[in-house]
Image (cartoon, grey):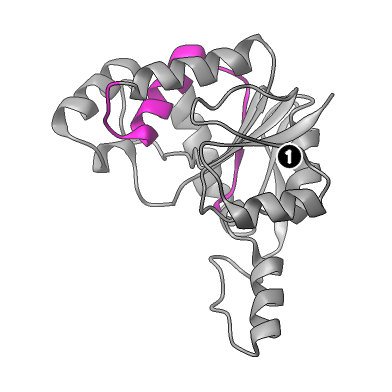
Amino acid sequence: MKRGIVLAKADEIIEARAVKFKLPITVDAERPFAYGKTLFVEPGSQVPWDLLPAAWHFLERWDAAVPLWRYGTTAADIGTKEERKATGAIVRDLRVLLHSWELLFVHRNEAGMALIETWKEEYAGGGDKRLAFLRALYTVKPRLCVLPTSWLADVNHQSKQAAMRGGRVMPAQGMGKPLVMIELEPGRFVKCQQGDEDAVRASFEQGRR
């Protein structure tokens, strides 16, 4: 199954790196499903290039994979009062962690395509895309692989760039912590940084309610 990257608008850095990793890239504001396994990236984001093989593998079993946005911030903390109310009508409990749609891996199957189309519909009228994604997620209910926040930092790339400049790079969140595999339910596993197990499990359990 073909793998590739979709960007809403051009990003020279991501496009150049995609060429290096021999990944086709599509630039289109409509975020089309251009590949069987698609990575939708927000321009300006850091792509964890060395972890992409693992992400493609996850899509063999899950409809989508996406990192948590940040620990400690829930759906109750962002957006307008009206949008939180609309989100609560679908999610019910807003005390759930949010996802980083800026780095979204999706399998081109019925559930994966429905997730993207429903998300587009939810944010078409404006508002917070993170809450819109949460509403789409709870509406479609795809098989979702929740990734740790460490996927949002391309640590190896940052270190190489800093070395080339002779400068220093600030430690990324959780840098130095080993990754561990945890079982969320029978047959469903995700990787997270050691010490984050409880937070990831709590987010998963809240999402099932």
Position of the C terminus, as image quadrant, is top left
The answer to which of 92 and 16 lies nearer the viewer is 16
Would residue 209 be seen by someone viewing this image from the given angle? Answer: no
Up the image or down, 115 lies above or below 47; here it is above
Few, some or many C-alpha atoms within 10 Å of disc 1 (few <14, some 14-19, many ≥20)? many
Q: Position of residue 135 (x, y in %)?
A: 38, 22
Q: Position of residue 98 (x, y in %)?
A: 42, 39
Position of residue 80 in the picture relative to residue 97 (left or right): left
Position of residue 71 in the picture relative to residue 184 (left or right): left
Up the image or down, 49 lies above or below 135; here it is below
Q: Which residues are magenta?
A: 125-149
Look at label 1 and name its amino acid. Ala
Determine the residue located farthest toward the bottom in the rendered image: 166
Up the image or down, 165 lies above or below 92; here it is below
Q: Name the residue that disc number 1 marks.
A: 55
Residue at (49% x, 23% y) in the render: 208
Residue at (78% x, 32% y) in the render: 3
Position of residue 209 in the picture relative to residue 183 (left or right): left
Residue at (34% x, 42% y) in the render: 74
Tag 1's secondary structure?
A: helix
Q: Position of residue 91 (x, y in %)?
A: 35, 21
Does residue 129 belong to the magenta stretch? Answer: yes
Residue 27 falls in image quadrant: top right
